[in-house]
Image: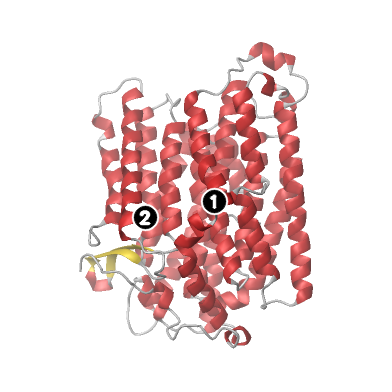
Amino acid sequence: MEHFPWLTITILFPVIAALFIPIIPDKDGKTVRWYALIVGLINFAILIYGFNTGYDFQTPGLQLVEKYAWVPQIDLNWSVGADGLSMPLIILTGFITTLATLAAWPVTLKPKLFYFLMLLMYGGQIAVFAVQDMLLFFLVWELELVPVYLILSIWGGKKRLYAATKFILYTAGGSLFILVGALAMAFFGDTVTFDMQAIASKHYPLNLQLLLYGGFLIAYGVKLPIFPLHTWLPDAHGEATAPAHMLLAGILLKMGGYALLRMNVGMLPDAHATFAPILVILGVVNIVYAAFTSFAQRNLKRKIAYSSISHMGFVLIGMASFTDIGMSGAMLQMVSHGLIGASLFFLVGCTYDRTHTLMLDEMGGVGVKMKKVFAMWTACSMASLALPGMSGFVAELMVFIGFATSDAYNPTFKVIVILLAAIGVVLTPIYLLSMLREILYGPENKELVKNEKLVDAEPREVFIIACLLVPIIGIGLYPKILTQVYDSTTTQLTALMRHSVPTLAQKTPEVKPSRWKFLSVTAPKIGN
């Protein structure tokens, strides 16, 4: 079974299954939603089985590799593979997308089109994390944006067209930098190739690396998002439905972090040595600015959206720490935030379905009538504020320790960064607990209680939150469940980063002879 095309099947199966949705006889959407859920479950089961069958935790290079010639004249191939950077995010994609499909149960407007787009996104998101060809990466990155745009513009709120247009302008505009960078790297040197391993093995002049790194930073910084390229996210979240929220927070933001690790850090390590302090500063700005902005928001969706921006700042600090534990913390934070962000935004949707308001001033005391919703809000908020025993605590602690013990920065800089980042950590429980108080505690809003039916959570909603809390608590109590999946890869990547800084390379004798070893294929190829 090691030669079985697991990744290709998990990419194409939901896409092909989506093509059958228009011919399914269904008037009210009940049949098509079950169809989409079953497809999602089957695809997730294939992912898990392929992971258990063909993925080795101790191997840092690409595994489950498949390569088929597409346009051989320019060395363009269907090339997919997974390593410690991509495999956790591929599994996260399958998990969150399947739950988002279940969260979309109440959708009644154009259900066939909605679930068609959901299944397209399923395959497209896995492809972004799996493809190993630069031009193919650009294509799937762009194609994945189309379903998000349509879901925002058709099923969003009152300002959905504005939010969707802003989303596509920001992300598509940033994608131009990916295309230009991919072409520049492919055509550099004596050979023309889009294969990521071949591109990474080329030796680029430092000036070219800096230009490429800056362009990629803009492109992926939009998706992460990094201040000041973040403004599309609060607008998109402000108008999105619960399933779209879960995909935006749970998966799309992680595409930016993954691409920064894969291309900026892995392919342009010399430029990363120059940009690393900038990433640290941008990470601190994300944490502090977004935390203060979230604290000031009165709209529930926008409050959680800015909280997401704040938490993603830890990813930037971790990947610029030049330490194994900091890099591991960055990966853990991406997965952790994917789970926590999806849970919070799903609860935002549940609350809005009952109160029909997003303004905190118009809520109050709803926990009395919605005890299950009260419990779920409390548990997920505790996870977001990094309560010990939950995944957010471990991830942020690892980033702090990794940066504090880094020998790449002087002590003064480290102290300033840690103190500023700590401000965001302190603000997070303040604005989250304040949010809980305004939604669930205190006197009831009599007007709200009179006009809205405040029913408690149904079993489907409890099941979705329970499914998200299990890995959140599991990773929090035993992080090795996740870290063992990517440790061998991130260790190699950290060694590569340190090798690019002469003073750090001298302290890293275990650096491998080949500086691109972590990108090498260490499993049999499928195809030719």
- Amino acid on which disc 1 is placed: Ile
How many circles with numbers are drawn on the protein? 2
**Which of the pair 177/525 is nearer the observer?**
525
Q: If the image is split into quadrants, where does the N terminus sit?
A: bottom left
Instruction: State whether residue 306 appears in this view.
Output: no
Residue at the image position 54 percent from the left and 80 percent from the top? 270
Residue at the image position 74 percent from the left and 65 percent from the top? 417
| Vertical relation: 41 (above or below) 31 | below
Could you give the CA–CA distance between mark 2 and mark 1, rounded to whole angstroms?
25 Å
Residue at the image position 38 percent from the left and 84 percent from the top? 189
- Amino acid on which disc 2 is placed: Ala
Horizontally, residue 63 falls left or right of residue 155, namely left
Horizontally, residue 168 falls left or right of residue 439, namely left
- Which picture quadrant has residue 294? top right
- Which picture quadrant has residue 305? top right
Q: If the image is split into quadrants, where does the C terminus sit?
A: bottom left
Residue hosting label 2 = 127
**Which of the pair 119/325 is nearer the observer?**
325
Element at label 1 = helix
> x, y percentage for residue 186?
38, 74
> x, y percentage for residue 120?
35, 44
**Which of the pair 110/398 is nearer the observer?**
398
Q: Residues within 10 Å of mark 2 (few under 14, many from 20)?
A: many
| Vertical relation: 103 (above or below) 66 | above
Q: Residues within 10 Å of mark 1 (few under 14, many from 20)?
A: many
Residue hosting label 1 = 475
Residue at the image position 28 percent from the left and 46 percent from the top? 13
